[in-house]
Amino acid sequence: MKALELFEEGKVYEVLLITKSNLTPVGVVRKGNYFYFKLFEGKSFYDIKGQPFGVMHITQDVELLVKAALNIPVELEFEDARKIPLKKIKNLSWIEGRVEFEESEIEDELGRSKVLKCKFIPLYGEIIPSIAKPISRADYILLEMAINLTRLLVASKRNRAEQEIYSKILHGYRKYRRLGGKSELAERIMELASIFR
């Protein structure tokens, strides 16, 4: 499968995962012909438990990843996947597959959490030609800010590690601006971070 070859083994890649009722960014690692990732308790967690299928989408649109992470509405067109009973995003490269999972609990600086340790078994995928954009360091900092914001939301509910995570977001924001980042999403992340710290 050509789409599989886009992922170098052992690296973490951010993709958009579609489950029965949700779209979320997830960090996946390829090992051999499979992908591995974790889902924390939420819509996708329960979707996979009830219907163990997913569609991974490959995108260079960091703002799309950030909006999905923050549940900000996005305008996308969907169509039926080819081999599984889910939808996929039109005009993005994708891999659809079956998900095997093991439910467990983990504990970190944010406390105890339920997690699904997932093995994604590719069934079908296609590469959609697109215009490659140059890599922007600012965009990847924006992505890290969004990831840290989702951690801050969990930390604030549990009264743990809030200040440290907020500091990471603030540091990322300053670096993002210094590198020429102009997205309004950065302002939105800072607004939300200030509320939840």
Image (cartoon, rainbow, N blue to C red):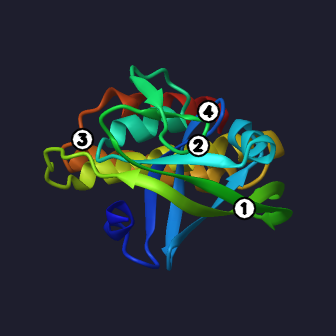
Q: Mark 3 vs mark 2: which is more N-terminal?
A: 2
Quarter holding the C terminus?
top right
Disc 1 is placed on an element classified as strand
Given the current orientation, which residue lies at the most extreme front position? 83
Mark pair 4, 2: CA separation: 15 Å
Q: Is residue 12 above or below residue 57?
A: below
Residue pictured at 62% horizontal, 29% vertical: 195
Q: Nearer the viewer, mark 4 or mark 2?
A: 2
Mark pair 3, 1: CA separation: 39 Å
The reply to whether the C-beta atoms of the residues labelled 3 and 1 are less than 8 Å apart is no
Residue 130, percent across and down?
18, 44
Left or right: 173, with 43 as reference point? left
Q: Mark 4 vs mark 2: which is more N-terminal?
A: 4
Mark pair 3, 2: CA separation: 38 Å
Which kind of residue does numbered mark 4 sit on?
Asn
Q: Nearer the viewer, mark 3 or mark 1?
A: 1
Left or right: 58, with 193 as reference point? left
